[in-house]
Image (cartoon, rainbow, N blue to C red):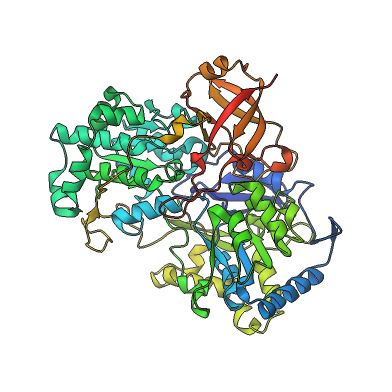
């Protein structure tokens, strides 16, 4: 170890379910290495491919180090006092002239920590500004499972070791949740059989014993087919259905509404595979189903999720160790919800996140006069991106709090440079496990960068509510963490490493009592018909934009994109279209087109193409510019995978 080298316990704050325990290795005033924390019970010292790239990103020469103000079309540095004085003056003017709802606060998911609650509370003190409804990510899945169980609760990831069968249904942990890979590999070593259900051969194919590739968006019919097969062979859990479920007769009628042949045709899966899955769910019990985020990226995503939940119920895998249908946890759940500040004002206007461009443009009485964006890059990541950019350009004053001049920064008036996660003090919960972990300032922020917490504290000093709002980070964290402290978690232990949430169950619903109005599991009673009118349109391919192993959403280093987008396509389809492997093509959708480089994939379904999400528009990789801005039927989620496209060979 070099002289002066130090190691700090940290936690990853990025938009990932792993929320891995980290160690930050520091030399001088710089973090030189991030490694996995071997004392974290979930990731056990492992680390994903993205984490080492964080350092390259956070110490990039293109990171913005001073506040910037746009004047006459270009940015110029300003002092923090100048930036915050103007921001405060404009906030006050909007409230006085148009009312607080003329201000939009857009809080994204780029950094998930406890003190982000304080950001939202600042805007509550203004009188209740316009905020967001829905999500670009998991709202559909949460809402769907809440219909079945009550508020969503998943099995602890450590319970994977009790499973004899593990079904990764639309989940790709090798690339997008490496924090649980140690447990999956150990379960496999103990003899657990792992099945992957995904329209594409994701990176997790290497982990699975078998890959099943249903037609995208038809997972409900696959789940119904498997459940029907279980019932036909008399292996359903009759006691669970009778004692703990509502609507068993309607659910059984649904299973027989279509023949097995019709269900298999609808999801495009062979009956032999359905039989194998039925065996896995019954003879292979306990069967743990880990649902991914791909299932809820459809308008009717709730049907997909609920059908899989019901399969867990009919097969007897709910409420038992090693079983369950698990999707995620509520990372804000361990905190005192009163700290959001909603009691400070009556309910106010919310704009739909999945359709934020059109929502901003349609807002009247009052219109949006000012927007403040934190931990987000909506111009890149929201669908119909060009409309989002147009909407922000129509807002008289936009503040962006971030690290780089990304696509959203191109449409802001004031840019406030923020600290990296290991440059600040905070607490991190997870939407992938039951632990909270610490952040401590391992190194100082470069230049004039500040944590968002310090930015809002300084900003609040310019308002009459400063006495009620301005506190130290410890004072706020003690308030936010009151539920954990009341359960016996010691304050000092929170800063030593990961702490498990005391009341989080290893196996939810083990007592057969559910958090629904009736106290019983709610079985699915209906699904939308098998026919799909989109198949007859001019666009023959379903476009999938999954998360990949190398980058996390739009968190890139400027200039590190390469261009154009690499689009994977079934080798047979690409050959039929006359497109060579590695050849140029044009991806055409309802909203426009993009140049792509086609990669032949012999294992991909012929009706699917996919590419990585998150590339910047300014780098020629804005895939969301051609994805329509729709909203899911339940949960106000974003159905990215409703996008259909064609691929045209370039002359």
Q: Can you give x and y, in whole percent of width and height, for residue 21 in the image?
A: 52, 50
Q: Quadrant of residue 281?
A: top left
Residue 306 seen: yes
Residue 418 seen: no
Q: Quadrant of the N terminus?
A: top right
Query: Is 263 positioned to the left or the right of 610 in the image?
Result: left
In depth, the one of 210 and 271 nearer the eye is 271
In depth, the one of 135 and 422 nearer the eye is 135
- Where is 390 relative to 293, above or below? below
- Where is 239 relative to 340, above or below? above
- Where is 25 relative to 71, above or below? above
Q: Can you give x and y, in whole percent of width and height, for residue 107 in the image?
A: 59, 61
Q: Quadrant of residue 86?
A: bottom right
- Where is 27 relative to 199, above or below? below
Identify the residue at horizontal 60%, vertical 28% (top origin). Answer: 567
Query: Is 570 positioned to the left or the right of 408 in the image?
Result: left
Q: Quadrant of the C terminus?
A: top right
Q: Can you give x and y, in whole percent of width and height, for residue 341 in the image?
A: 52, 75
How many marks the image carries: the answer is 0
Q: Quadrant of residue 131?
A: bottom right
Identify the residue at horizontal 74%, vertical 71% (top origin). Answer: 87
Q: Can you give x and y, in whole percent of width and height, for residue 157 in the image?
A: 39, 47
In depth, the one of 182 and 634 nearer the eye is 634
């Amino acid at each position: 170890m070099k002289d002066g080298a130090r190691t700090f316990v940290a936690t990853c704050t990025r938009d990932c379910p792993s929320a891995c325990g980290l160690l930050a290795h520091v030399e001088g005033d710089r973090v030189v290495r991030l490694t996995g924390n071997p004392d974290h019970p979930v990731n056990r010292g492992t680390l994903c491919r993205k984490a080492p790239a964080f350092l390259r990103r956070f110490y990039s020469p293109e990171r913005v180090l001073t506040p910037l103000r746009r004047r006459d079309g270009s940015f110029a540095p300003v002092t923090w006092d100048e930036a915050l004085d103007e921001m405060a003056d404009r906030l006050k003017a909007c409230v006085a002239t148009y009312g607080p709802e003329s201000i939009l606060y857009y809080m994204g998911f780029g950094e998930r920590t406890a003190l982000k609650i304080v950001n939202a509370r600042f805007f509550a003190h203004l009188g209740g500004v316009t905020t967001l409804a829905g999500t670009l990510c998991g709202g559909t899945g949460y809402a769907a499972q809440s219909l079945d169980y009550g508020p969503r609760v998943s099995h602890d990831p450590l319970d994977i070791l009790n499973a004899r069968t593990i079904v990764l249904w639309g989940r790709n942990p090798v690339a997008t949740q490496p924090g649980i890979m140690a447990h999956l590999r150990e379960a496999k070593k103990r003899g657990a059989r792992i099945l992957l259900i995904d329209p594409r051969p994701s990176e997790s194919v290497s982990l699975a014993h078998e890959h099943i590739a249903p037609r995208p968006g038809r997972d409900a019919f696959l789940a119904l087919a498997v459940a029907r097969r279980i019932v036909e062979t008399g292996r359903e859990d009759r006691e669970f259905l009778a004692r703990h479920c509502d609507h068993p007769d309607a659910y059984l009628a649904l299973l027989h509404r279509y023949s097995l042949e019709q269900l298999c045709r609808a999801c495009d899966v062979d009956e032999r595979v359905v039989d194998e899955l039925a065996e896995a769910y019954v003879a292979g019990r306990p069967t743990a189903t880990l649902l991914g985020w791909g299932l809820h990226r459809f308008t009717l995503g709730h049907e997909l999720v609920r059908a899989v939940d019901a399969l867990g119920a009919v097969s007897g895998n709910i409420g038992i160790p090693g079983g369950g249908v698990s999707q995620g946890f509520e990372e804000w759940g361990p905190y005192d919800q009163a700290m959001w500040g909603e009691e400070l004002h009556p309910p106010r206007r919310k704009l739909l996140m999945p359709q934020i461009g059109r929502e901003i443009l349609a807002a009247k009485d009052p219109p949006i006069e000012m927007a403040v964006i934190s931990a987000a890059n909506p111009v890149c990541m929201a669908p119909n991106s060009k409309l989002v950019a147009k909407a922000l350009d129509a807002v008289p004053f936009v503040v962006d709090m971030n690290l780089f001049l990304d696509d959203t920064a191109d449409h802001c008036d004031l840019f406030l440079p923020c600290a990296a996660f290991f440059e600040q003090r905070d607490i991190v919960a997870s939407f992938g496990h039951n632990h909270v972990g610490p952040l401590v300032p391992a190194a100082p922020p470069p230049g004039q960068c500040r944590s968002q917490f310090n930015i809002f504290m300084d900003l609040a000093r310019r308002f009459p509510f400063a006495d009620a709002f301005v506190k130290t980070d410890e004072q706020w964290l003690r308030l936010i963490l009151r539920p954990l402290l009341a359960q016996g978690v010691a304050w000092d232990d929170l800063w030593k490493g990961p702490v498990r949430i005391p009341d989080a169950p290893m196996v939810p619903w083990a007592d057969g009592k559910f958090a629904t109005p009736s106290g019983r599991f709610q079985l699915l009673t209906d699904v939308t018909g098998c026919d799909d009118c989109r198949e007859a349109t001019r666009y023959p391919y379903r476009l999938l934009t999954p998360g990949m192993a190398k980058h996390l959403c739009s968190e890139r280093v400027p200039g590190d994109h390469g261009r154009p987008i690499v689009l994977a396509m079934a080798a047979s389809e690409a050959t039929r279209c006359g497109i060579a492997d590695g050849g140029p093509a044009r991806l055409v959708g309802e909203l426009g087109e993009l140049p792509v480089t086609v990669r032949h994939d012999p294992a991909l379904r012929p009706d699917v193409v996919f590419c990585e999400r998150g590339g910047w528009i300014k780098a020629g990789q804005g895939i969301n510019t051609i994805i329509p801005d729709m909203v899911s039927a339940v949960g106000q989620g974003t159905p990215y995978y409703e996008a259909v496209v064609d691929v045209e060979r370039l002359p």
